Amino acid sequence: MNPPILVMGATSGIGRCAMDEAVQRGHPVRAFGRSADRLDPSDLVEPFVGDATSADDVARALIGVRAVIYALGIRERLAMLWQEETLFSETTSVLIQEMRKADVSRLVAVTGFGAGRSKSAMSWVEKTGHRAVLGKPYADKDRQEALIEASDLAWTIVRPVILTKGAKSTTYRVLREPDEWRNGLISRSSVAHYLVDAIERDLDVRSDVVLAR
């Protein structure tokens, strides 16, 4: 059996979909999350309760893995309109440091459309609305992306557009060139399909992509 894929944020959202997608393809998964004890263990799923800001927890989670999918998210709340967000940059800094120590090089990290240089692909109207509602979290995603890009890891930055609960599609578009980047809709399960593909096929190493339907 192959070494496991570590999925950070495996208990909900894109992370849960990525865990399910990997298992459907026969890959063992180490499912990292604060509430990972709620997951059902199986031959292919190893729940791993941990805090992504803890270097000790992340170091233990990285033992013997082949690659990392980073899909941590935050709970939507009114206070995120004014509160500074640091979760993405803080946990990514810890992860990069511990991946180097563990000699694990492959990182596929989910951020979002509007983070990093994809911000330039937004219209004025999109930028204004995005900044008003998601300005604080995305400022931290900017910092997160900068950390990843400055690292020596075999990274891929994945920016899905607006997420839906729809069915998985394998005909989504992987927009690799900045002049192709645009907003739109995509299901979480379709994003998960790409994340596992990126690990299986070594797609878009040291590149940033936008995913859209």
Image (cartoon, rainbow, N blue to C red):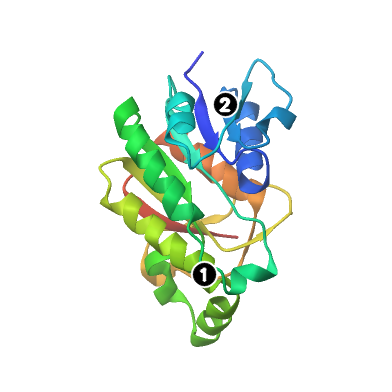
- Along the viewing direction, whichever of 94 and 72 lies nearer the viewer: 94
- For disc 1, the marked residue is 136
Which residue does the image show at 53% across and 78% down from the upper left? 131
Q: Position of residue 191 (x, y in %)?
A: 58, 49
Neighbourhood count class around disc 1 (C-alpha, 10 Å): few under 14, some 14–19, many 20 upward: some
- Along the viewing direction, whichever of 123 and 25 lies nearer the viewer: 123
As drawn, the label of residue 29 is 2
The reply to whether residue 204 is in sight is: no
Residue 98 image-quadrant placement:
top left
Q: Position of residue 24 (x, y in %)?
A: 65, 28
State the separation of the CA atoms marked 1 and 2.
31 Å
The reply to whether residue 80 is in sight is: yes
Which secondary structure lies at badge 2?
Answer: strand
**Image quarter in which the C terminus is found:** bottom right
As drawn, the label of residue 89 is none
> Label 1 sits on what residue type?
Lys
Q: Position of residue 50 (x, y in %)?
A: 57, 33
Is 36 displayed left or right of 208 in the figure? right
Q: Position of residue 36 (x, y in %)?
A: 66, 32
| In this view, the mark in front (1 or 2) | 1
